[in-house]
Amino acid sequence: MARRTLPILKRVLSKPPSLIGLLSRLDPKRSVTYMPRPGDGAPRPVTLIPGDGIGPLVTGAVEQVMEAMHAPVYFERYEIHGDMKKVPQEVLDSIRKNKVCLKGGLATPVGGGVSSLNVQLRKELDLYASLVHCFNLPGLPTRHQNVDIVVIRENTEGEYSGLEHEVVPGVVESLKVITKFCSERVAQYAFEYAYLNNRKKVTAVHKANIMKLADGLFLESCREVATKYPGIKYNEIIVDNCCMQLVSKPEQFDVMVTPNLYGNLVANTAAGIAGGTGVMPGGNVGADHAVFEQGASAGNVGNEKVLEQKKANPVALLLSSAMMLRHLQFPSFADRLETAVKRVISEGKYRTKDLGGGSSTQEVVDAVMAALD
């Protein structure tokens, strides 16, 4: 067979350069087709929690865009609010059944002994890793360029363990719990994320110079996991220096892995640098379930003026829903949605007030739907 094909190959290579050039131009453009398994295109149920304040406004925006895309998802809606004492059992059952949830902001009362429903959800579903993607959107002016940071935060322990009590009147004790098990699994998730997304570096954020046992255990766990990924650079940074470096030279960071409280602060700082909390997507993931929501703190969740004017920014939750579609293995729908959102931001005609514009939520949504390929 080789003897017969060799003369044919010689004749092909002896053809005029124009033919060879044509072949070389055609081949790289051949598309790679995603080959689904039978049934992969069946619509997937997603638990929807509109939440408080602007939550129903921005989750409603996602519903409109999903319908316009004919995305293979449908929503099971549940009304819960931040002032409830606990997450209703039917909501937890729905998320456990569907495996995926999309959530608007839930307002957590300050003080008063009411526990956060956000924290309850994370603990009940063991959503041990929070991911916030902070990056520059084309056309959106920011102080720093080339920002592309993924903050992965331990989500179930640390200062958020909720173990606090009043020892005597006027003295409160709050426990910070760090375990090797939880530290190792969030470190493993961070390195796995970096590996699968072609990221080059993972930075562990800590305060082990002061909290030598607790943050020391977290660092020890990160170092052990790092040895399993020799192709990914690993370094460490103290949290106060980290905040200073973020606002002065954020482009040096790639993937960051943090204990619970530090991750909350670092993610919001990075979001503010890259364009604001209104455009940063995020999600919370565990072994079996995932909850997608606005990545950084939804500080305007209870902003009555924004709600009254219907000018809440839907971009963060739209991008979070694109992350959800990718999680559900609908990559082409995720790409379409992300491309449409980025096109609207880049053109600059329709932006909400937090991005320097004056558009309403609905005007942004209509622009995104019009930009869908």
Image (cartoon, rainbow, N blue to C red):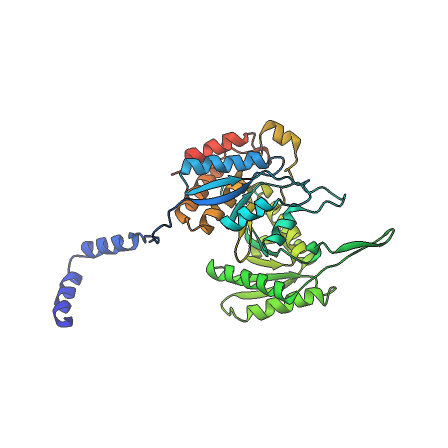
Compared to residue 278, the image places residue 122 above or below, namely below
Q: Quadrant of the C terminus?
A: top left
Q: How many marks?
A: 0
Q: Is residue 43 visible?
A: yes
Q: Is residue 231 left or right of residue 236?
A: left
Compared to residue 213, the image places residue 160 above or below, namely above
Q: Nearer the viewer, residue 329 or 372?
A: 329
Residue in the image at 58% along x and 48% along y: 92
Residue in the image at 72% along x and 44% along y: 114
Q: Quadrant of the N terminus?
A: bottom left
Residue 354 placement (x, y as % from top left): 60, 36
Q: Is residue 290 left or right of residue 174?
A: left
Q: Quadrant of residue 174?
A: bottom right
Q: Is residue 119 left or right of residue 254?
A: right
Q: Is residue 133 visible?
A: no
- In this view, which residue lies farthest toward the top? 309
Residue 263 placement (x, y as % from top left): 64, 54
Q: Nearer the viewer, residue 99 or 6?
A: 99
Residue 350 placement (x, y as % from top left): 50, 32
Q: Nearer the viewer, residue 310 or 27?
A: 310
Compared to residue 170, the image places residue 103 above or below, namely above
Q: Is residue 16 left or right of residue 91?
A: left
Residue in the image at 87% along x and 51% along y: 169
Compared to residue 131, the image places residue 187 above or below, namely below
Q: Quadrant of residue 220?
A: bottom right
Residue 229 placement (x, y as % from top left): 51, 68
